[in-house]
Amino acid sequence: MIARRLVALAAIPLALGLGGCAGLERAMDGEPPLPTVAGAVSLSERWQTVRDEVDNTDSVATWHAPDGRHLLIATAKQTDRLLVYDAATGTLKRKFGESGTGPAQFDRPNGVFVIDDLAFVVERDNRRVQVLQLPDLEPLLTFGNDGDGPLRKPYGLWVHGLAGGDYRVYVTDNYETADEAVPPPAELDRRVQQFLVRRTADGWTVLRERAFGETSGLGVLHVVESIWGDPRHGRLLVADEEEYRQRNIKVYGFDGRFTGRRVGAGVFHFQPEGIALYACADGSGWWFATDQGKRENFFHLFDRQTLEYRGSVGSPTVLNTDGIWLTQTPMPGFDHGAFYAVHDDGNVAAFDLGELLDGVGAARCTD
């Protein structure tokens, strides 16, 4: 969750009932009418990690080792460290890092993304991304806080693995005015920064490729944190957390331009937060997005191809979710993969991914 100075226009009611979506609020101006095909279902988690609100947990990611180990990594914003769990059981394995500006040190770690054997961690107050080698979390490099146009208040990231072993990293930057307000649209052209990270025989190189964000129209990114990409369909989904006038996900292309599509307007009632993609080899699948509320909290599903709303899942015990992550890799106790959600700043809940999909009638991958 991003704290910000905004003026509330009105209270937002929520009336999602089991088995139907009659209580969903009308679509926002310019959006198609809400679908009537699916509703919210309630699903209990398999387990939760031990709770510690002092950590102020934000985001999660998994790593599956070749030797069969399954790790779940969570960022702890307040204690400046990473929490490493067994991804199948939730057992805490280690706490890594400390406060500071050096390697293996953090200052308010927020977003985390795992790809191959690398963990990319956004540090909001160090204004950088730190890259760590798994499984030992050996620090490899940092970037983003130097050169022309450095990161100012980064939060989330998504990493695209490229042919040849390079990585393209997209980082959301929620910079503010001096009085901590959202800047005017004309100044929001750097809401996403794009870097090319390359491993060479001589070490690592990082190239800041560009920054982007619309400065007028429906594609303006007012308040940003979560971002995720779908190379198969050429889309970057960026959540706009401005919760009184926006509450939607903006769809950008890999060219850095707004496509004209917005996802979930009228479906979200609180803050659009964590984003994850359930991807099938044939191009089908499902987008997951958090509707972060302190009294009611939902995970909405949208069709990967059409972006149409499918349905919503809630939990009787999991609230105020920031980051989410899903893995389609089978593990002990999770034959069809797992879905992880942060619970109210203090711990992580794990859901059976197959049960979640079945609950809203979302087809599983057949490949």
Image (cartoon, grey):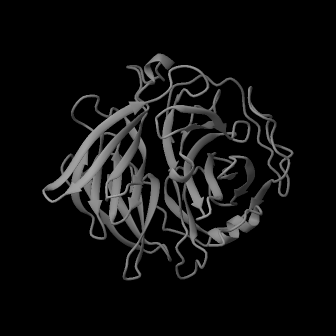
Total tally of numbered discs in the picture:
0
- Residue 257 image offset from top left, x and y in percent: 51, 31
- Decide: is 341 above or below 158: below
x%, y% of residue 125? 31, 39
Name above or below for residue 159 compared with residue 363.
Answer: above
Examine the rendered structure and indicate whether residue 6 appears above or below residue 293.
Answer: above
Residue 210 visible in rendering: yes
Pick whichever, 13 or 330, lies toward us.
330
* Depth check, front residue: 253 or 89: 253
Whether residue 153 sits left or right of residue 292 in the image: it is left
Classify residue 129 as left or right of residue 173: left
Q: Position of residue 337 (x, y in %)?
A: 57, 72
Is residue 2 in sight in this rendering?
Answer: no
* Residue with the most extreme left position: 202
Can you tell which quarter of the image residue 276 is in?
bottom right
- Name which quarter of the figure residue 250 lies in: top right
* Position in image of residue 353 (x %, y %): 63, 68
Looking at the image, which residue is at 56% across and 24% down?
6
Q: What residue lies at 53% left-to-right and 46% top-to-bottom?
A: 234
The C terminus: image quadrant: bottom right
> What residue do we see at 60% from left, 42% from top?
272
> Above or below — where is 281 with respect to 202?
below
Q: Residue at x 32, y 58 (%)?
A: 164
